[in-house]
Image (cartoon, rainbow, N blue to C red):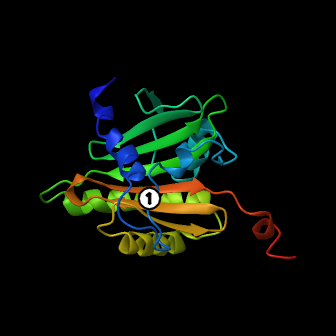
Amino acid sequence: MKMWFHPLWLCFALLSASVSLRAAEAPAPATAPYVLPGAPTFDQTISLFRETFNRDNPRLPLNEFRAIDGPRDTPTLTRAASKINENLYASTALERGTLKIKSMQVTWLPIQGPEQKAAKNRALEYMSAILRAFTPALTKTQSQQRLQKLLTAGKNKHYYAETEGAVRYVVADNGEKGLTFAVEPIKLALSEALGGSN
């Protein structure tokens, strides 16, 4: 395994953490929801997502995702990652076989010094673009505002989640150890899918 993939275990560990609180004040899950059997997927493969993302965000390219092998893999889950730069990574959990997305994550590993502000702004651009990719009704400005609200609510929390429609937004803030933002699909109950009608 190439060395630059090593920090990527951080983002998966952050999202699998069983500490802090969820948005609804419920305990954080001991296992990340996307790992559980029967967890839903977005209806697009990682290759289709990357192609669409790069077309829609020419200033924010995503390189090819490469599989990450590790002891936490499951028979139904494949993990993959794409290095954006030395302190910014995109990673994903995929349904094994179909390669449909179960979780899309961006992790920023903070740096010190004069480049910190620019590096963080770059990370926020990617996070906002990922949010918008899975919530296309939002404008660029709206997605940036939504991201800021989520990051503020999740500040200094190892796991913070909010749901909106069929999407879960997750923030895992470990300060100097890293900040991860993720978008995941959720299963809607039949009543929700029907708009709450009886």
Q: Is residue 174 above or below residue 80?
A: below
Q: Amino acid at mark 1?
A: Met
Instruction: Give the percent coordinates (x, y) of residue 86.
Output: 26, 42
Q: Quadrant of the C terminus?
A: bottom right
Instruction: Give the percent coordinates (x, y) of residue 21.
Output: 40, 68
User: Going 51% across and 62% down the picture, which residue do you hit?
Assistant: 169
Q: Quadrant of the N terminus?
A: top left
**Residue 64 seen in render:** no
In the image: residue 168, left or right of residue 61: right
**Of all residues shown, which one is farthest toward the right?**
198
Q: How many marks?
A: 1
**Of all residues shown, which one is farthest toward the top?**
1
What is the quadrant of residue 194 in the picture?
bottom right
User: Going 29% across and 40% down the picture, which residue do you hit?
Assistant: 7
Q: Is residue 19 above or below residue 26?
A: above
What is the quadrant of residue 101 in the picture?
top right
Nearer the observer, 17 or 126: 17
- Mark 1 crowd level (few <14, some 14–19, many ≥20, 10 Å Cα): many
User: Going 27% across and 28% down the picture, which residue do you hit?
Assistant: 3
Q: Secondary structure at mark 1?
A: helix
Instruction: Give the percent coordinates (x, y) of residue 127.
Output: 44, 58
In the image: residue 8, left or right of residue 176: right
Q: Is residue 48 above or below residue 134?
A: above
Instruction: Give the percent coordinates (x, y) of residue 176.
Output: 20, 57
Please give the residue where the numbered disc 1 appears in the rendered image: 127
Nearer the observer, 103 or 21: 21
In the image: residue 53, left or right of residue 150: right
